[in-house]
Amino acid sequence: MAKNHTIHCKDERATAEAVRILANAILAFYAPTPQKSQSLFISLDGDLGAGKTTATRYLLQAMGYGGKVKSPTYSLCEEHILDLPNEALHIFHFDLYRMQSPEEWVEAGLLEHFTQSENPTLCIIEWPGKAESTLPAMDLSITLMHPNQQESELARTVAIEANTVKGEAILQSITSRSH
């Protein structure tokens, strides 16, 4: 089974489509009935301005979230609740860009969102390197990269790496849908 997959997106529309495929794979992971403690952890990496927050916005919208998805750069964490057919999915979107040390992350109490919950949970974390080894294993690690100089500035390369069995199942779903 593949542990990584790369998608080259020539423009913003192609990036949104790649994220839609990821959204469908995530929804399939939580279907048909999410389990109380079912969780999924996704890290988003990339240079400043690579589109991490925009990708998260596209992801949540493609999953059916109708509310506003704003950057958690200053709040550090934004919670969104997505109503699935039989259960609410709690989505926590983190941005650790402003963190100076891993201790800040832990002291802020944000790590508790990654522990067992009574609700199905999706945690998406931008700038995970700022938390160093305080984070649990990410199911999927996604890196967004700017184009080379011959491509449009709206082009992106999306590299997805599965780090767990759950991540591998989602990656398998992504690769089967993107061909």
Image (cartoon, grey):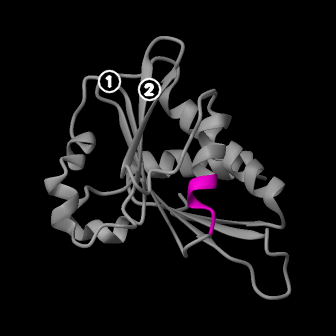
The residue carrying pointer 1 sits among few (fewer than 14), some (14 to 19) or many (20 or more) residues within 10 Å by Cα, namely some
Instruction: Give, as a three-letter code, the residue at label 1.
Output: Asn
Specify the farthest residue to the front.
74
Relative horizontal placement of residue 168, taking residue 8 as reference (left or right) = left
Q: In the rendered structure, does residue 174 fall within the stretch colored magenta?
A: no
Q: Specify whether 52 is left or right of 121.
A: right
Q: Nearer the viewer, residue 85 or 111?
A: 111
Q: Which numbered disc, 2 or 1, marks the residue that appears first in the sequence? A: 2
Within the image, what quadrant is residue 60 found in? Answer: top right
Q: Which span is picked out in magenta?
A: 50-54
From the image, give the main secondary structure of the stretch colored magenta: helix
In the rendered structure, which amino acid carries the disc numbered 2?
Leu
* Residue that mark 1 sits on: 119
Mark 1 and mark 2 in contact (Cβ < 8 Å)?
yes
Residue denoted by label 2: 89
Q: Position of residue 140 (x, y in %)?
A: 46, 56
Q: Position of residue 170 (x, y in %)?
A: 53, 45
Say which element carries label 1. Answer: loop
Position of 113 with respect to 124 (left or right) is left
The picture quadrant where one finds residue 173 is top right
| Residue 96 in picture, x, y percent from top left | 36, 62
SS for tag 2? strand
The residue closer to the viewer here, 96 or 114, is: 96
